[in-house]
Amino acid sequence: MARIKTLGYLLLLLGLLGCQPAPVELSPELSKVVTTTGMIADAVINIAGDSLSVEALMGPGVDPHLYKATQGDLKKLREADIIFYNGLLLEGKMGEVLDKLGRLKPVIAVGEAIDTSFLLASSRYPNAYDPHVWFDVKLWQQVVQSISYTLQEIDPGNATYYQANTTEYLSQLDSLHQWVTIQLAKVPEKQRVLITAHDAFAYFGRAYQIEVRGLQGLSTVTEFGLKDITDLVQFIIDRNIKAVFIETSISERSIKAVVEGCRQRGHQVIIGGSLFSDALGDYQTPEGTYIGMVNANVITITKALQ
């Protein structure tokens, strides 16, 4: 298991460990759950414990915007009793497959459970919203509760068990939200600017009062050009920003081009670290869970920007 970098991180994780209700017997109506992303799979695991088989198609370092389902994925999706995916166009290349499967079994877009008044509209696509809702912990709590309600409806015999687990997990997420707010408030407001490869952190910025900029748009399908790099370089110089960030699921090439552009203009900016954006970290590490992923990102951001 990867080393936990700070004592604060360790104490938070220990504080989030609560007593879980005893697992129940598997329902014959519901046994296998397949999700697209690791974030959704982690939510289902926290709700269902060991009572369900849960598998995410997209592992560490995988970009869901560009992901194409393999033959093995299609087999897993056909065999699943229920499928949870993010929706809001995150899994763009899988949309048609998921629509077809939705005629045969429950296929749930968890992001679309959030009232649109809480969603950020896309600046590039009409009638579309930013799909990266997991970066606002309070919004993600709505997703978790929605998943729980769905499982309770499909498997009412285990509803009490699912809801007890959900209540415990939502309490952990409350603590996480409070911790993130406190940590980011330590960064002076003038320095609270987060620059990444693509525009994945808008909800994070809104929730925790940090300005965000991405070289690419909401989706990594969007190409970036010389003007995008030039404009971002000028922004960094004008604001005297000292650190930018790469993402684990996206090539470093774009951000390195920005760093080089700044260097050529006489401004030194460093790569402040690698952030988890569209995927969790490696399995069996703290970053392989939603809570651990958020913690790791916040530690990396605050260390680089302070």
Image (cartoon, rainbow, N blue to C red):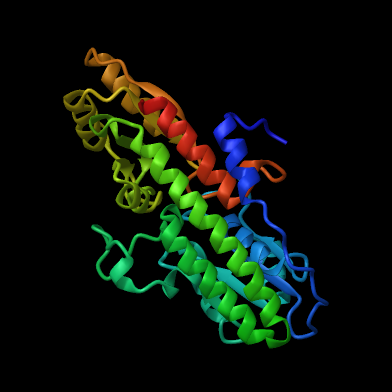
Residue depicted at x 60% and y 68%: 166
Q: Quadrant of the N terminus?
A: top right
Image x and y of residue 256, in percent: 39, 26
Observer able to see residue 11: yes
In the displayed structure, 26 sits above or below 269; it is below
Residue depicted at x 24% and y 37%: 228
Q: Residue furthest left?
A: 238
Residue depicted at x 36% and y 29%: 244
In the displayed structure, 115 sits above or below 213; it is below
Image x and y of residue 112, in percent: 42, 73
Image x and y of residue 59, in percent: 63, 51
Q: Quadrant of the C terminus?
A: top left
Q: Please give left or right for residue 281 compared with residue 199 in the image.
A: right
Q: Nearer the viewer, residue 66 or 50?
A: 50
Residue depicted at x 61% and y 50%: 16
Q: Please give left or right for residue 238 compared with residue 287 in the image.
A: left
Could you say which quadrant of the image residue 78 lies in?
A: bottom right
Q: Nearer the viewer, residue 121 or 77?
A: 121
